[in-house]
Amino acid sequence: MHWNLKTNLRTSMVLTRMHQVEEEKEDEGEANMKGLKEEIKDKNDLVFDNSAYEMLHRFTLEWPCLSIDFVLPDRLDANFSLYNPGLSLPESVLVDYTDVATSQKTRRHKDDKYPYSAYMVGGTQTDAKSRVANKLYVMKLYDMYRTQYDDQSESDDDPDNLDDDPNLLFEWVPLKAAVNRVRTMNNSAVAALWSEAGEVAIYDLSPLFVKLNAKKVNNKKKSKKNLKDVKLKVCGFNHIKEGYALDWSPLKKGFLASGGQDANIRLYIPSDTTLGDWQMSESPLKGHNASVEDVQWSPAEESVLASCSVDTTVKIWDIRSASSKNSQITFHAHDTDVNVIAWNPACTYLLASGGDDGAFKVWDLRYLKRGGAITNIKWHAGPVTSLQFQPREESVLAVASSDNRLTVWDFGVEKDENAKQSEDKDIPEQLMFLHQGQDDIKELRFHPYYECMIASTASNGLNIFRPNFSPVDNDSDSENEAEMQEAKRENEQMTDNNCSSYSFVIQHCSIFYALFRLSLIHISEPTRRTPISYAVFCLKKKKKKK
């Protein structure tokens, strides 16, 4: 299924296809994927084509950030309205948009266009030996143009593809300890952070964003304006042990939940509607037997939240319950630590989990008693460190791992029985995109407004990119048919030359062309020539020198 193709079948296919994935891949998929991953590790065999991304920009800060989050420009103060992030955006902010590559017409946010700008926050982890203070960064990234045609001469004719370098403006708040996790309240300028010192603190960062917007365009340095008299930290709550789990309610403004290594979950309730102060609940939610690694509020029920733990379980809580020691639902999710969970905002009975075993699963909360996860994919070679469903897309999930890979999966992909069988039967059809080039990826975040724009943070910097899910130029049917036939001949020739030919099932082009299915893979790799991440499009092996 084409990424931008909207059909009436897509919604109905989601759960059906999830079941098929588990049934078809459970026995043989793990061994086959392991062999595939070993082959991909050979970086010298990758051929680069920049068209794998619509946009790819890399930013390096003084110190790496363990956690990041987006801030929306229309939420730089507390006067904003909440809405279910899984639903369509308000009609007042939407405009008509036509995809250049596919001619598909959609409705997008009015700011979803080149050049892009984005506001973000990030919490650092400095080297303890350096004795440098940690920072809570406030960033403005702008002039982010399309990079898809950077290798082509015709890119000069595209106003969205200028060669101008992207810019980064930043301010920071000095901190006494490293930041384990930072989350903005509904993508506003109010941010909460978990520090390794065991403190959950809430900051109002709006003065820093105002300061960023007041800077000159070409001035990337910290401005000299003094903010010492401005109170940025609203409140803080000290705990015996540190933690990582932190999440704001998408439905009740100001409601915050945290989970720590003491196995407890605590709630923080605003004292009034002005959000000038918070109070921590007296009785924590108890039930886990080990560290709580993640918490997620339900996108549909304002009193419901989910949690996962090192004790291998996921629990669903109703904070209205009289007993704080009993969760409403508990199920065994992984055989190892459960690191992260993500609620599907567009299909609110689906919950994803990622574990230390490198597997990620999707659970249908309506049918837990009937069996296990409706999807169980173990593709990554290291622990899953972050995952998130794409806003307003019920079947699209991004997954990051400590194996230095970030993948995007679409469980709405339909298996085409009539298409020619691919030579590589081992590749999961749901794998849409594979991003590499970052070391030890800690977290990924989808932009709430911009279509499929992803930010990922790692030990070697911050990447912000948009995958190119429309690599085929649809100028005419005959041209596309010729291109696909040429790609087929190249693959056959490579096979004859004893060169491995990969055929990753990324798009089922037989939806548009009945002759055969074009299979694509997108991978990014760093090179010695340039600091920017490189990509692989139609992955091929370099011919070995004799």
Image (spheres, rainbow, N blue to C red):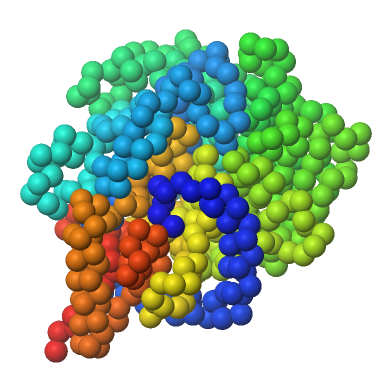
- Look at 61% across and 31% down and name the residue there: 84
Q: Is residue 326 above or below residue 94?
A: below
Q: Position of residue 72 (x, y in %)?
A: 45, 26
- Look at 49% across and 48% down and name the residue there: 7
Which one is nearer the viewer's eye here, 62 or 120? Answer: 120
Which one is nearer the viewer's eye here, 77 or 181? Answer: 77
Q: Position of residue 294 (x, y in %)?
A: 65, 46
Residue 143 picture quarter: top left
Q: Position of residue 380 (x, y in %)?
A: 50, 66
Which one is nearer the viewer's eye here, 252 or 175? Answer: 252
Quadrant, the N terminus: bottom left
Outermost right residue:
322
- Look at 60% across and 53% down and name the residue there: 12
Q: Position of residue 448 (x, y in %)?
A: 48, 34
In-image side of 130 versus 11 (left or right): left
Q: Is residue 517 above or below residue 470?
A: below
Residue 303, visible in the rendered structure: yes
- Look at 75% across and 37% down and name the residue there: 304
Quadrant, the C terminus: bottom left
In-image side of 253 versus 77 (left or right): right
Q: Is residue 494 above or below residue 59?
A: below
In-image side of 12 versus 366 (left or right): left
Which one is nearer the viewer's eye here, 172 or 337? Answer: 337
Q: Is residue 6 above or below residue 228?
A: below
Residue 465, visible in the rendered structure: no
Residue 543 picture quarter: bottom left
